[in-house]
């Protein structure tokens, strides 16, 4: 088995895949591909040019959600993160999609991009867009707080891809100098801390700290 993740460590989707691999105790290497600066050959793996992609031997697959589900099917002896029955799978998929398509455009593509990445690319920070995104995030925080209720994890009373997909967005949110308001969303804030304590995420965050330091 030879697993290569293509991408850059500060992407929430790359973090999701790397944490999934670590949780499954699958060894991989990370090959750096920067969005907007991809080599031509990368478009043969992902015609959209987006990161992450995974190479497993001769097999290529892209999109973090598809990659994690592939790993679950391909390596069934590893810890299950995608659910053990139809109901769990559906709930996990829903929350993962919610994180990837509702939260990410605001927390990562707007707040993190403008506050942190834009500067490093010589672009201005669009603070008006950031403030609009922060306002739009409020109902998402409310919904997720309500979904979590009194549980430690979103689904099945154990760590799953739903927890990972959501918390990976909070990491980029914090890199954009914002944080969940623990007074307003105490369960969600505690959940974030709980998930970030995991060994997989602790090791990734240590790696990312070097990159954040370089970005200044
Ligand atoms: N749904 C995709 C989203 C991937 C994505 O949007 N990645 C960003 C980096 S965080 C990217 O590659 N953007 C470059 C582009 O869209 O050209 C996934 O889960 O992998």
Image: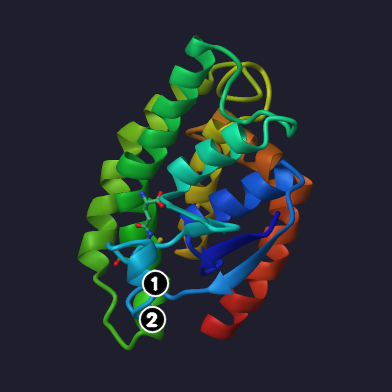
Q: Quadrant of residue 90?
A: top left
**Quadrant containing the N terminus in the rendered view:** bottom right
> Mark 2 falls on what kind of element?
loop
Q: Residues within 10 Å of mark 1 (few under 14, many from 20)?
A: some
Question: Percent position (x, y) of residue 42?
Answer: 39, 72
Q: Is residue 7 left or right of residue 77?
A: left
Relative to 120, residue 44 above or below: above
The quadrant where ligand 1 appears is bottom left
Residue 42's mark? 1
The residue at the point 66 percent across, 28 percent down is 80
Does the CB distance between marks 1 and 2 fall below 8 Å?
yes
Question: Percent position (x, y) of residue 183?
Answer: 53, 36
The residue at the point 27 percent across, 57 percent down is 131
Residue 39's mark? 2
The residue at the point 52 percent across, 82 percent down is 215
Question: Percent position (x, y) of residue 169?
Answer: 47, 49
Along the line of sight, the residue nearer the viewer: 140 or 77: 77
Q: Is mark 2 within 8 Å of ligand 1?
A: no
Relative to 39, residue 90 above or below: above
Question: Percent position (x, y) of residue 123?
Answer: 28, 83
Residue 118's mark? none
Q: Is residue 128 left or right of residue 52?
A: left
> Mark 1 falls on what kind of element?
helix
**Quadrant containing the C terminus in the rendered view:** bottom right
Q: Is mark 1 within 8 Å of ligand 1?
A: no
Q: Is residue 69 left or right of residue 197?
A: left
């Amino acid at each position: 088995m030879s697993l290569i993740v293509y991408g850059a460590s500060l992407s929430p989707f790359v973090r999701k895949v790397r944490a999934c691999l670590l949780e499954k105790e699958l060894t991989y290497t990370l090959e750096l591909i920067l969005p907007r600066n991809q080599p031509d050959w990368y478009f043969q793996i992902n015609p959209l040019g987006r990161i992450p992609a995974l190479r497993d031997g001769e097999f290529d697959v892209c999109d973090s959600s598809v990659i994690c589900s592939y790993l679950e099917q391909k390596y069934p002896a590893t810890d299950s993160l995608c659910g053990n029955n139809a109901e769990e799978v559906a709930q996990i998929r829903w929350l993962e999609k919610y994180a990837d398509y509702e939260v990410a455009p605001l927390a990562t593509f707007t707040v993190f991009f403008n506050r942190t990445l834009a500067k490093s690319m010589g672009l201005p920070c669009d603070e008006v867009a950031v403030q609009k995104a922060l306002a739009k995030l409020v109902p998402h925080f409310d919904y997720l707080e309500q979904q979590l209720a009194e549980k430690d994890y979103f689904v099945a009373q154990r760590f799953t891809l739903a927890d990972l997909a959501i918390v990976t967005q909070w990491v980029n949110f914090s890199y954009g100098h914002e944080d969940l308001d623990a007074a307003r969303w105490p369960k969600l804030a505690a959940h974030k801390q709980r998930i970030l304590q995991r060994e997989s995420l602790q090791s990734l965050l240590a790696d990312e700290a070097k990159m954040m330091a370089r970005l200044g």
